[in-house]
Image: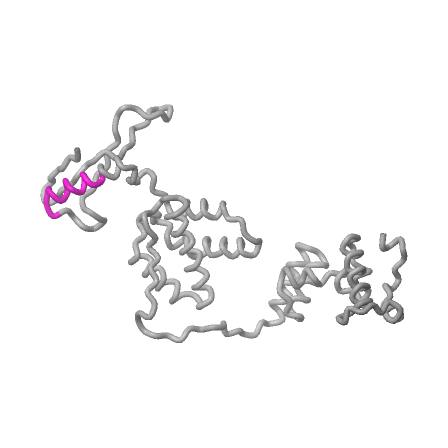
Amino acid sequence: MPSVEVRGQNVRVKWWGGEYHLDEHGKPTKRKKYESASGPEPGVAFEDEDEAYNFGLDRESEVRNGKYRPKSAEMNMVEYCDLWFSTLDLRVRTVDKYRSILNAVIKPYWRQWTVGQITPVDYGMFKTYVTNKYSELYKRGVLSVFRMLMDDAVLKYKLRDETPVIDQRHRGRYEKKQTRRVKGELPIEAVHQLAVNADHVWGYAGWVYIWTVAFTGMRPPGEMYGLQRGFASPYWPASDPDRDRRRGQIDGTREWMCCGSSGRCTTRAASRFWRAPNTTRTELS
């Protein structure tokens, strides 16, 4: 049964949270660990002893039904972000993006909070903070990661009963969203310094890589990966360094030039136009 204490103008209730004190070896003893509260929620006090007593009864009922989450099970947001991030299995670029958002925005903002303390009002303040400080594209990325954090806290880790993320559309003042970031001129000195840094780390390949990205607009890593010597050579696919891929591409090219889109074989005509330059039987094998 809960115990109610009256201290001046304050009413406090204690109840058993379903846990026991641990001994010096970390094993539970027979001494129960009680929890207490001075109000139904932080910053709100009980009106009288009956309200406090009923509050304690509700907590003990949750303990008996296995629905109660003791205070010792509450996890700090920074610790939870590290736990959540360690379980991700995504592409390299996506993992880097999530790590950057967690370290730059979410962890510093929520470092004093536990997962169960965040309310919809707190999320609204966080959303306003992100909206005022960052661009539209980055804001959507931050809120998307935070929404995934809260959804997994409810469904996967059972650290919350419900998510605090509540999106009410068509509410508030209308603001035209910035669809694209306004791009400014990048001074050539900045590109040169970046190329110098890459040269110290990668060598001459890094120097060439930075200048190629700057003057071609190719996106790493996919488009730049395709700009390898084996793929960019005018003698491709014969110049492909991978033997199996080279044989498959050459056979496919021969078949296409032989039959074409009509489906009729024109081997004799095709033989006059297609030839793997500087390719011998030894190279193909």
Of 208 and 177, the residue lying toward us: 177
Residue depicted at x 59% and y 72%: 187
Q: Is residue 81 above or below residue 180?
A: above
Residue 145 image point, x, y percent: 44, 56
Residue 68 part of the magenta segment:
no
Describe residue 134's horizontal placement relative to residue 117 as left or right. right
Residue 96 image point, x, y percent: 54, 54
Describe residue 82's horizontal placement relative to residue 184 as left or right. left
Residue 243 image point, x, y percent: 79, 53
Of 53 and 271, the residue lying toward us: 271
- What number of labels is visible? 0
Quadrant in the picture for the N terminus: top left
Residue 55 part of the magenta segment:
yes
Residue depicted at x 62% and y 67%: 191
Type of colouring:
one colour
Which SS type dominates the magenta stretch? helix
Residues in magenta? 47-59
Q: Is residue 131 above or below residue 28?
A: below
Using the rendered view, name the quadrant where residue 189 is placed: bottom right
Residue depicted at x 30% and y 40%: 69
Residue 276 image point, x, y percent: 85, 63
Describe residue 174's horizontal placement relative to residue 232 as left or right. left
Using the rendered view, name the quadrant where residue 104 is placed: bottom left
Residue depicted at x 18% and y 46%: 39
Of 99 and 192, the residue lying toward us: 99
